[in-house]
């Protein structure tokens, strides 16, 4: 059964995160711009890459495969689940405490049904401002 991949809209976004704090942002997909009805994202894989500039190498990769992005399925919510601190040496290496404060760009690719869609293609990548943790 095909997914709603080709119904996903082009996005414009900016995020403000802090080094050492958990990232708990989310993107909610709805069936139409003025609607509150969720667009199911079941069966779609997502991958976000964080870089210092558009043509720079990625400093972090978040995906539904590595657990740093969570696909909410029928509720249409894609959640970020990036820890602020690495809970143990066995935990995945990505955490906001390992990133340098500053400005970043983020791409977001959705994949399903043998196709890929760049969700920030129309407006360019999302911007991410990573601030120094308060009290650090």
Image (tube, rainbow, N blue to C red):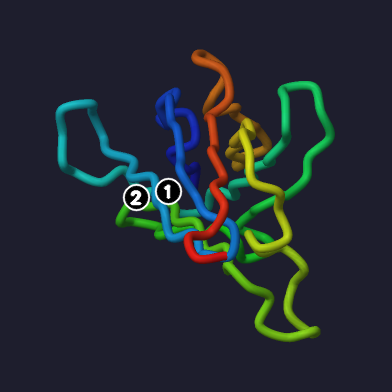
Task: Specify few, some or many for label 2: CA neighbours under 10 Å numbering under 14, 14-19, or 20 or more.
Answer: some
The residue beneath circle 2 is 76
Image-quadrant location for residue 128: top right
Q: In the picture provided, is 89 more to the left or to the right than 21? A: right
Residue at the spot 60% in from the left edge and 42% down from the top edge: 112
Residue at the spot 16% in from the left edge and 34% down from the top edge: 35
On screen, residue 47 above or below 70: above
Residue at the spot 18% in from the left edge and 43% down from the top edge: 37
Q: Position of residue 8 (x, y in %)?
A: 42, 32
On screen, residue 78 above or below 58: below
Q: Nearer the viewer, residue 41 or 15?
A: 15
- Identify the mark nearer the N-term, 2 or 1: 1
Q: Nearer the viewer, residue 38 or 95?
A: 95
Q: In the picture provided, is 11 more to the left or to the right than 47? A: left
Disc 2/disc 1 C-alpha distance (Å): 5 Å
Q: Position of residue 76 (x, y in %)?
A: 34, 50
Asked if disc 2 and disc 1 are in contact, CB closer than 8 Å, the reply is yes
Q: Nearer the viewer, residue 35 or 24?
A: 24
Extreme-right residue of the structure: 57
Extreme-front residue of the structure: 135
Residue at the spot 66% in from the left edge and 63% down from the top edge: 97
On screen, residue 70 above or below 106: below
Q: Quadrant of the C terminus?
A: bottom right
Label 1: element kind: loop
Q: Position of residue 60 (x, y in %)?
A: 73, 49
On screen, residue 35 above or below 92: above
Label 2: element kind: loop
The residue beneath circle 1 is 41
Q: Which mark is residue 13?
A: none
Task: Specify few, some or many for label 1: CA neighbours under 10 Å numbering under 14, 14-19, or 20 or more.
Answer: many
């Amino acid at each position: 059964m095909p997914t709603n991949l080709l119904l996903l809209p082009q996005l414009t976004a900016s995020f403000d995160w802090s080094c050492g704090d958990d990232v708990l942002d989310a993107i909610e997909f709805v069936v139409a711009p003025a609607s509150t009805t969720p667009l199911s994202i079941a069966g779609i894989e997502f991958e976000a890459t964080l870089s210092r500039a558009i043509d720079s190498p990625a400093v972090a990769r978040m995906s539904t495969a590595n657990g740093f992005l969570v696909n909410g399925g029928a509720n249409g919510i894609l959640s970020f689940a990036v820890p602020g601190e690495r809970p143990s040496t066995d935990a995945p290496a990505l955490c906001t405490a390992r990133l340098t404060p500053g400005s970043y760009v983020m791409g977001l690719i959705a994949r399903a049904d043998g196709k890929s869609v760049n969700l920030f293609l129309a407006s360019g990548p999302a911007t991410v401002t990573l601030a120094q943790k308060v009290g650090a």
